[in-house]
Amino acid sequence: MNRVFSRPGVLAAVAITAAALAAAPAQAATGRLGWQPTLLPLPAGADPVGHGYLTGSDGHGEYSGSFIVGDKLQVISWRGGQPTLRGVPDGFEWAMAEGEDSAGRIYGEALDYDTGADRTFVADATGFHLRDNPPGYRSFQMRAVNRRGDAVGMVFTDDPAGHAAAVWPAGAAAATVFPLPSGADNVVDIDDDGSILFSGFERDIVWKNGVSRPLADIPGFSNPHGSAIRNGVVVGFASNGNASQAIRWTTPETPVALTGGDYASDLNVGGLTAGLAPIPGSFRYKPIVWRGTTPGGELKQPGTYTGYESSHVADDGVFTGWASNGPLDEGGVPVIWRFTP
């Protein structure tokens, strides 16, 4: 699912930030098996070290994200490997793409540095379309979008007790606002059937039509947290104070440990899942793959970049992410990974 957690002035790509370090330089795809990287070109005027995130896809070969171009964080999309600078909404200097639906509409948030105005947008073939905040709320923070184009997030008041969840249905003129379910403190993701994954104080919750279903523990681990939901399946992790364990919940009540991983970050319609595994003897991590619950290898190192990460799995089986020789939470250059049999 398309998801990026971000606030104005801070570029934070995932709930867990980890630098991925490969043991050897990446080679060309020829003669190699596994998940091979392709560095995508940036448009003219872009910061050569990237400083951005490739975060979304329409599932049909288009990829999207936000990168520094000139002195602005701007939306860029790629089709056929070539970039198109989508820019920022008029009057804004910062535009973070949060996700893309199956029709190629890009969803995100924009910031005006001069006034502090923070607005959400939808970008399509005709340009940017700004959305008003729901009446009575000072801002709407987008968290995720599903394949249909239903956007979910949080709305805020001056009193934290008044914060609420909101869904902006695809094509609707206004958001639907409702109280957070009992035990929930934030929104994480939205499934294609409208089910919402909430983060919770003790455990995360899958909510639909007023019914909450908490994520179950697995033996030896507690505080289960989901990162993404798709077709009713949740992926995420749990911890025991000393270690973390990647988990897949076929239903909220039926968790299965994902072998070899500490954290699962996203999955696509076919169950292809992105995650992280620890590197023995190091505090660093490497990005890995599961096919359902079966380990599917690791994402190969892009060129000479020592750090790389994927937070999104497209429905065409491509992993999207970024690479950097600096801190990954500051972004990098755009990368996609495809499987080479």
Image (cartoon, helix red, strand yellow):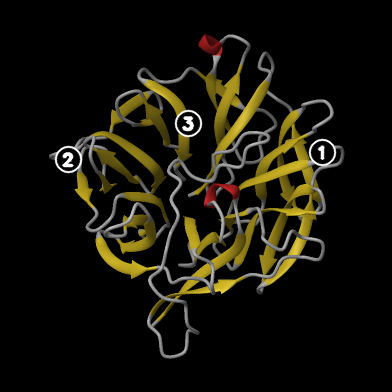
Categorize mark 3 by other alpha carbons within 10 Å: few (<14), some (14-19), many (20+): many
Spatial distance from mark 2 to mark 3, Cα to Cα? 23 Å
Residue 186 image point, x, y percent? 46, 27
Can residue 313 be seen in this snapshot?
Answer: no
Q: Is residue 122 visible?
A: yes
Badge 2 or badge 3: first in the primary sequence: 3
Residue 126 badge: none
Badge 2: how crowded within 10 Å, few (<14), some, or many (20+)? some
Q: Disc 2 marks which residue?
A: 218
Q: Residue at x 62, y 64 (%)?
A: 62
Q: Quadrant of the C terminus?
A: bottom left
Identify the mark nearer the N-term, 1 or 2: 1
> Mark 1 highlights which residue?
92
What amino acid type should be assigned to the residue bearing mark 2?
Answer: Ile
Residue at the farthest right position:
91
Please tell me whether mark 3 or mark 1 is closer to you in this view. 1
